[in-house]
Image (cartoon, grey):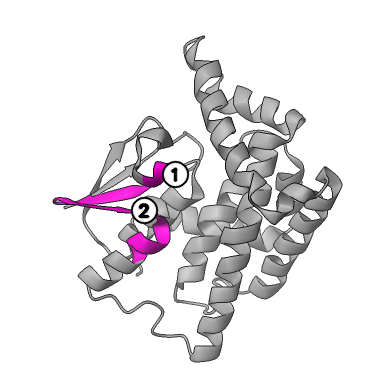
Amino acid sequence: MIKLCQFRAPRFFPNLSPYCVKIESFLKLHHIPYEIEIIPGAHRAPRGKLPFIKDDERVISDSTVIIEYLKDKYKLNIDPHLGDKEKAESKALQRLIEEHLFYIHAYFRWIDHDSYKEFKKAVFGKMPFIMRDIVPTIMRRRLLKRFKSHALSDHSKAEILSKAQEDITALAHFLGDKKYFFSENQISFIDIICFSFVGNILNDVFASPIKEIALKHPNLKNHSDHMLQLFKSDFPYS
């Protein structure tokens, strides 16, 4: 059985890491049996990142590599209902979310001083006294190092917020009044991606500028809420 190694799930969403939600959603959607192993911190993970999976003696890291491994192992045909143009659009949206919007969200969780204080209090505030400082401090240092290698690190807070507005608005316009991104009745991989990342923004338990932007788009909120219910019921319609 696949063992999914990830952070402990919070009360308000399947996981604080959108990449962990991405992999667990993919497993659920394709009805692949798995069990969860809680890893206290990414410093204990291969490549220093969560999630990773164990399959017998094999350990696979990085969400993209994990997806490719699962596709090959279980002979999965991802998004067979999409044509070449739609698959290209889906890939572009995935890049926008995973390689741009993710870093903006990380900025408002971990780097912006005011938002970080609220995030730390909401997520780590009930930990034992010493741990509530040590754990987020270690994680923040890792995110700061990762963020510095991204082009966004050269921008001001106002500029980053403007880019968040552009990204989220683009996603909202593409979704429009559809139930799913490319179909009224069939989930596509990009629905999993959007749920994992935008759903994380919408379900943050602290006030942040990026959450305020996302909440202005009811279609994204409806999409996230619907996908969350499907996640909780193991995607019964897939």
Q: Which mark is residue 14?
A: 1
Q: Is residue 63 on the magenta stretch?
A: yes
- The residue drawn where x is 56% and y is 71% is 179
Q: Could you say whether the residue bearing mark 2 is in a helix, strand or loop?
A: helix
Mark 1: few/some/many CA within 10 Å (<14, 14-19, 20+): many
Q: Is residue 177 visible?
A: no
Which amino acid is tagged 1?
Pro
- The residue drawn where x is 37% and y is 77% is 78
Describe residue 24's horizontal placement relative to residue 190 as left or right. Answer: left
Q: Is residue 183 above or below residue 161?
A: below
Q: Is residue 12 visible?
A: yes
Range of magenta residues: 47-67
Describe residue 198's horizontal placement relative to residue 185 as left or right. Answer: right
Q: Could you say whether the residue bearing mark 1 is in a helix, strand or loop?
A: loop
- The residue drawn where x is 35% and y is 40% is 45
Q: Is residue 149 on the magenta stretch?
A: no
Q: Which mark is residue 59?
A: none
Q: Position of residue 119 (x, y in %)?
A: 63, 30
Residue closest to the eye, 211 or 140: 140
How many numbered marks does the figure carry? 2
Q: Is residue 95 above or below residue 105?
A: below
In the rendered image, which residue does mark 2 sit on? 24
Which amino acid is tagged 2?
Glu
